[in-house]
Amino acid sequence: MSDERVSALVAHVGAFHITDRAMRKAQEAAQQALAAGRLEARALDDYLTAVRRYFTGFEHEARGHLRDVDRRLEHLNQVQFNLSAERGVAVKRIEATQAVLSALDGAEDSR
């Protein structure tokens, strides 16, 4: 991996708020080594392993959250569909009862 790509990766990872102690330690070590101009192959391998482990877990968590949100949205859409159908039935009942009441008013007026 080129120095430029390593620097870009370290900067990209550094933009995240990292709470995991091991990942934070690896990030700090990589930043310090890059600043000193001496990120050695073994340290780079350890860093890349730490980044992969952390972000793979992070991705799994985010995908799980996305599945949960999608499931909840599907439920919400079904509820909205059902309520729209119920509203349509209620409107038709009102129209039908108004027609009966109008007919009743007409019948009463003609007595």
Image: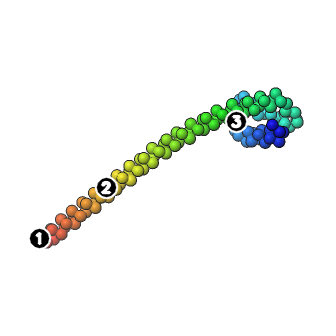
Hey, which quadrant is residue 89 in on the image?
A: bottom left
SS at mark 2 in the image = helix
Q: Quadrant of the C terminus?
A: bottom left
What kind of colouring is applied to the model shown?
Answer: rainbow
Residue drawn at point x = 81 percent, y = 29 percent: 43
The 10 Å Cα crowd at callout 3, few under 14, some 14 to 19, many 20 or more, is some
Q: CA distance from mark 1 to mark 3?
A: 84 Å
User: Which numbered dot is residue 53?
Assistant: none
- Which of marks 3 and 1 precedes in the sequence? 3
Determine the residue located farthest toward the front in the rendered image: 1
Query: Of residues 57 and 20, which is closer to you in this image?
Result: 57
> What amino acid does circle 3 point to?
Ile
SS at mark 1 in the image = loop
Closest to the camera, between mark 2 and mark 1, is 2
Q: Is residue 51 left or right of residue 70?
A: right
Question: Where does label 2 land, which residue?
Answer: 90
Residue drawn at point x = 52 percent, y = 43 percent: 70
Q: Is residue 109 above or below residue 78?
A: below
Hey, which quadrant is residue 105 in on the image?
A: bottom left
SS at mark 3 in the image = loop
Give percent across and percent down for residue 71. Answer: 49, 41
Question: Where does label 1 land, which residue?
Answer: 111
Determine the residue located farthest toward the bottom in the rendered image: 110
Query: Of residues 1 and 8, which is closer to you in this image?
Result: 1
Give percent across and percent down for residue 30. Answer: 80, 34
Determine the residue located farthest toward the left in the rendered image: 111
Question: Where does label 3 land, which residue?
Answer: 18
Q: Is residue 98 left or right of residue 25?
A: left
**Residue 20 shows in the view:** no
Residue drawn at point x = 77 percent, y = 38 percent: 10
Q: CA distance from mark 2 to mark 1?
A: 32 Å
> What amino acid does circle 1 point to?
Arg
